[in-house]
Amino acid sequence: MIPSVLPTYNRAALQFVKGEGAWLTEADGRRFLDLGSGIAVNALGHAHPALVEALSNQANALWHVSNLYQIPQQQALADKLVEHTFADTVFFTNSGTEACELAVKMARKHFYDKGQPEKIEIITFDGSFHGRSSAGIAAAGSEKMTKGFGPILGGFVHLTFGDLDGVSNAISDATAAILIEPIQGEGGIRPVPDAELKALRQICDAHGLLLILDEVQCGVGRTGKLFAHEWAGITPDIMMVAKGIGGGFPLGAVLATEDAASGMTAGTHGSTYGGNPLGCAVGCAVMDHVSDPEFLAEVNRKSGLLRQKLEGLIADHPDVFEEVRGSGLMLGLKCKALNMDVVNAGYENMVITVPAADNVIRLLPPLTLTDEDIGAAVTRLDQAATQVENA
Ligand SMILES: *Cc1c(COP(=O)(O)O)cnc(C)c1O
């Protein structure tokens, strides 16, 4: 008999009932160190007082109004995002997937309204992840995600990750945009080198294409900059944001330049919940923290400390781990052992990591992780690795 919850997930037998900072309490009372943050969502950790206050104040005042009316919290969050990024304008969604939907629509409408309706193709890369909607799976294009769900939305050209020559060769009169994650998350913490992001920006400029960055996982302070593309010194035309921006409240956004967004006039897009007062009140509190240069400096300092300890861990367990990669507090441990065995051994040692493609385990801790937490993380990962070795 089918379970009452549609069985699309392989769930661990863990049930968390409370969270505080980087720690989660299981129903049986055990305390787990959370190096997953609900997949890069709880950017400020669990039950951060500023987020609890923002949410409960807003909950007491007003939960929801339609986008038929002015929403001051939404205006305030859009202003913050515009102030701190390349963007001139923001549309709020409930998730990263919906951000992908709009990014695709926005790019196509941009060219349609400029009298170039033939420009519909979007170049994407293997190993990417852009959500599970029809556009999201078509954009990523992997058989794992698309098989059985045809007809698959057309207009995506899939290239090998890192194949810059392929990009130039793939561009035609039909090309509208290049869509890429500055650091692939689900794909196994695969960073796009700064030089490559710069080259993609130049290619887009040379051919009049839009550069769409998916920063759903790598954005919002995760890499030690507010957004990951800042490391490369470039800006996109359109950017997808979600996960960390709501700190645990479902919230996403599409950020864009005025020119890229020029086709999205009144009536061309909408969302019932996107940008509602609850989500945006929390989003404002998240932004106030993560946009602070001192907060970002701390993310970078802690990243250095964690990486250094992880190098030691790899040296101590050469049969389990191969390398550490990534940026800021978006780190991947490429495994020699089966990554799922390491994740499961982590559970037994009360440390949570997240598996990814390419036999990687992801470390995406709350950005508020303390030095003490980092010590505990490495101790528990060391115990887990020892357990894998002895299995
Ligand atoms: C998680 C993720 C998405 C999809 O976001 P949802 O909120 O799950 O819809 C899209 N792109 C990237 C890079 C992601 O990591």
Image (cartoon, helix red, strand yellow):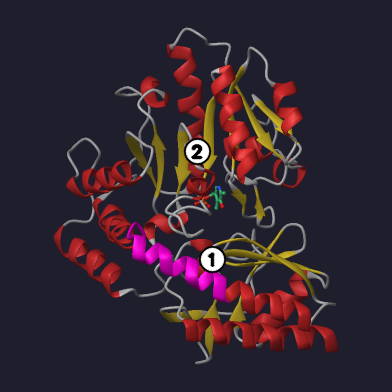
Look at label 1 and name its amino acid. Leu
Image quarter for residue 11? bottom right
- Tell me the tag on residue 195: none
Residue 301 in magenta stretch = yes
Q: Is residue 280 above or below residue 330?
A: above
Q: Position of residue 241 (x, y in %)?
A: 45, 47
Q: Nearer the viewer, residue 206 or 119?
A: 206
- Whether residue 15 is visible here, answered yes or no, is yes
Horizontally, residue 335 falls left or right of residue 380, namely right
Please identify the dominant SS of the magenta region. Answer: helix
Image point (65%, 46%), residue name: 193
Q: Nearer the viewer, residue 359 or 168?
A: 168
Which part of the image, by quadrant, shows the N terminus?
bottom right
Residue on which disc 1 sits: 329
Image point (77%, 88%), residue name: 386
Look at label 2 and name its amino acid. Ile
Specify start and end residues of the magenta stretch as a single range.
Answer: 290-305
Which of the two labelled residues, at mark 1 and mark 2, occupies the earlier sequence position?
2
Q: Residue furthest top?
A: 115
Q: Position of residue 258 (x, y in %)?
A: 35, 26
Q: Secondary structure at mark 2?
A: loop
Other residues around mark 2 within 10 Å, as few (<14) / some (14–19) / many (≥20): some
Residue 256 in magenta stretch = no
Residue on which disc 2 sits: 234
